[in-house]
Amino acid sequence: MINNFEIHIDFDRLESNLPKFECEFNFEGVKVYTTKREIVFIGSIGSYETMSIQEATAKCRPKIISIFDIISFLIGDSITIYDINYQSNSVKHNEDEEETKSNKFKFIFNDVDLSSQLRIILSKIENDKNTTLTLLDKWNKANYLLNVDDSHVLFLDETIINCFNIFELLADTTKKEYERFIDEQSKKLLFEFYTNMGNLDNNKINDKVNQKNRLIKEILVGEFLNLSDKFKYYLQKYRLLDENLSYFVDRIIKVRNSIAHGRIVSNLSVMEYPLRPFYNIVNPEANLVNPIIVLTGVLISKYIGIDIWEEEWEKIKEILEPNPVRVKEVIEGKLAIDINEKNQYNLTWYSVFLYYLSCKDKQRDSIELWFKEEIKKRKFETLDFYNLYEISVILITTQDYELYQILSKIIFKIIKEDVCKWSSYRDIFLHLEVRNIMVEENKKKIDEIINKP
């Protein structure tokens, strides 16, 4: 008996603004194709005994989910079973070969032919089915959770966890290779040590190395490999790891741990926009979510052997925040970088603002002095106003009259010409209050600046 099924998704009836695409291919006996209005899936489940519709649906569901995951990865938007508009089932004695099979193969999205990328994905699934489909499904789920509400805030914590599952899965794919690398490096270290002692022949040196190797590995990396090291090795293997990405990984690991271990919400008095229906632990780090989604996309691409998501990742790299150590080096004069201009570290005035928030009062005083000297060096019209607003707002309570005059001029121009990151210049106050920073005096000063005759 052959249990046939047919599924339709109407582009125009989707709740999300799913980008249209053209495709025609087969996946495990399911024919997939698009018309002007629909995505259509036609397939069958063979059995020696009669199955109920529920049984047939249960057996075809994994294939449909996999196809959704593949398409979602290629177009960068989530498709799920919730998007199905029509589904039918029928039973035949013989399978209609022409109906479920096709030699045509194409996938076109945004006028770009992704057929070769799709072919590689299908080949990877054939050779490494469980890992590849698990990665694609978790990526699709993360996108679904992120976009399930219009403001992209309902399932932020859950989105992070799904992405982190991807990191863990990918890190495990190179775990054994990383262990061999550590073993080689520790043996090399021991061999060099015993060789330099000068009183042992090669046989004795090798014996010593083998005896001490396990101990030295435990001293250097511990008994178990931590996720950060494993994941960074994966990034390094695919030539993605740099200083800013390393810091980014450290940040998102802290966020993940906070979510997984149930950290108490730090502020129950105020929220910043977009407003949430529930408290999110990840709320103060919500700006990390989109870079994480893109990072997981490019990492899965590397694993599969395709190059989609690389262009998007290059754009994300340009806005990754630098390690605060670099900001400190600039302030202390140890790193000669002009943060008013684009630079290799992504250091900006906004980086100084973030560093300021993490510092204690004494350090903040030194930042204020440094800022004054730096800002005075430059012509006003050449300043990077887009990145100056936050640090100017936080320093506006200064007791230094000269600095206050400079900051007032900067803030007035930014607000008047609307060149800050925020939809409203007052959003910065909520941003600071959520982080338990008192802003009443800052508000008063800025009101005086913009209302000054």
Image: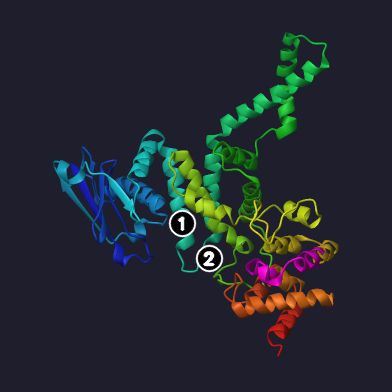
Residue that carries the numbered disc 2 in the rendered image: 153
* Snapshot quadrant of residue 214: top right
Depth check: give the residue in front, 379 or 286.
379
**What amino acid is at disc 1?**
Asn
Residue displayed at 38% across by 41% down: 121
One can see residue 439 in this view: no
User: x and y percent of residue 437 in the render?
Assistant: 74, 70
Q: Main secondary structure of the magenta part?
A: helix
Instruction: Classify mark 2: helix, strand or loop.
Output: loop
Dot 1 or dot 2, earlier in sequence:
1
Depth check: give the residue in front, 437 or 81.
437
Using the image, determine if residue 410 lies above or below residue 168. below
Would you say residue 376 sits in the magenta stretch? yes
Residue that carries the numbered disc 1 in the rendered image: 143
Residue displayed at 70% across by 26% down: 186
Magenta range: 370-390
User: x and y percent of residue 443 in the render?
Assistant: 72, 80
One can see residue 13 in this view: yes
Using the image, determine if residue 268 lies above or below residue 112. below
Instruction: Classify mark 1: helix, strand or loop.
Output: helix
95 lies left or right of 152: left
Mark 1–mark 2 Cα distance, whole angstroms, equals: 12 Å
